[in-house]
Image (cartoon, coloured by chain):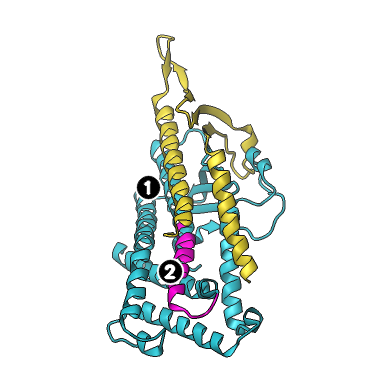
Amino acid sequence: MSLSLFSFWDFPSSSGASAVSFAASAETAVPPATWRVDLPPDHQAAAQELEVYASQAQASLQVIAALPERIDSLVARVQDSGAAGLSFSAAEQADLPDEEADLLLSLVEIDRFAEQVSFGLEERLPQDWQSSYRQFQAAASRLLRSISHLAWVETSQGGQLLGRTSVGWAGDMQTFYRPALLPQQALLHQRSLEVALAARYALIRLFTATIAASSRLSLLLATPGGALLSLPAVWKYVNQILSEIEQYKLVAAR
Amino acid sequence: MANEFDTALKNVAASIAQYVKDASMMQVETHYVEIAENEPVGFEMAKPVARTIIKLDGDSETVIPMRKNEAGSNVVDSELFELHQQNVSTAIDYRARILNALLSTLSGRG
């Protein structure tokens, strides 16, 4: 995932003991997912930076929340076109947004390929599709593991650690502050925690929304198991939309 | 690949079941820790300042931070307590959102 907001979350892909001394880490053998942000020394600049991230998280959630309606509209549009099944013409309508057009083209390719291969479809998928699917699967696995284990949120300012919160599977939290912290520094970590959890929640919503959208779009496919095959295409589609929203937010914040 | 997808969905379902089970109680703790210059942070030395336990049946328990005032009486350290309360609010909000997100997977509307 290329979105800068989510890039603050590090989801380790390998197991092993944590190198950091932290009592609660004994709860899991899996390295914790960690949100780590280092804010500018100037307090106002630091607070503003966090608000940009908060705004990105909020925008991402709005996009994801609107996804079912957007997918339903796309499905209805194709079904109302009167064509028997998917076709390139469905993706070539002038008023169709680029992201939706690309998605439909991917689905058309899935159907066409499936027509040519009557058996052993999974093994005969083009290499790049298998690769896309594996990428989605890897992202989903890391995400699922991250929400089922401990996660850490660390906030620094000018390289100095302000606070760290461990977030358990069911929302249990332990927050550690350094002493003699200024009230505004404590608030920075508090806000960082809120943003980190909002981003984590957005990632979970992204994952569940992708599965639901794939299931819905499979109505357009003649291919058995279409929901499975369309997962990488839908994952890419949703990420494209989110990237555009994020770019807009970054530009607007300048 | 179909098996992998099935496994992913089963993991989600199992996660939801586990989440609901674990959600019967939530604990939020706030600590402070000395951080020396150029030394690793030793979080095991952290000192607790407040703790809240919330149970699904409505029971809750809070240990609040107190300090002596000039007259020698115990008073609530309102700054620390407010900080802790913000953490509790964040935890409650987070749990509700995650639970809703996981349940929405079952409804098929993601």
Instruction: Identify by letter the chain in cyan.
Output: A
Q: Position of residue A38 (x, y in %)?
A: 48, 53
State which chain is coloured yellow.
B
Chain of the residue that carries numbered disc 2 in the rendered image: A
Q: Residues within 10 Å of mark 2 (few under 14, many from 20)?
A: some
Specify the label residue A35 is tagged with: none
State the image coordinates of residue A125 (x, y, percent, origin top left). Answer: 61, 83
Amino acid type, callout 2: Arg
> From the viewer's perspective, is residue A234 above or below residue B92?
below
What number is the disc on residue A216?
A: 2
Q: Nearer the viewer, residue A127 or A213?
A: A213
Where is residue A24, by image quadrant?
top right
Is residue A70 at all visible to an observer of this figure? yes
Residue under the image location 62 percent in, 41 percent down? B41
In the rendered image, which quarter contains the C terminus of chain A? bottom left
The residue at which mark 1 appears reads as A43
CB contact under 8 Å: marks 2 and 1: no
Number of labelled discs? 2
Instruction: Identify which amino acid the numbered label 1 is placed on.
Output: His
Could you tell me which chain the residue with mark 1 belongs to? A
Nearest the camera: A60 or A251?
A60
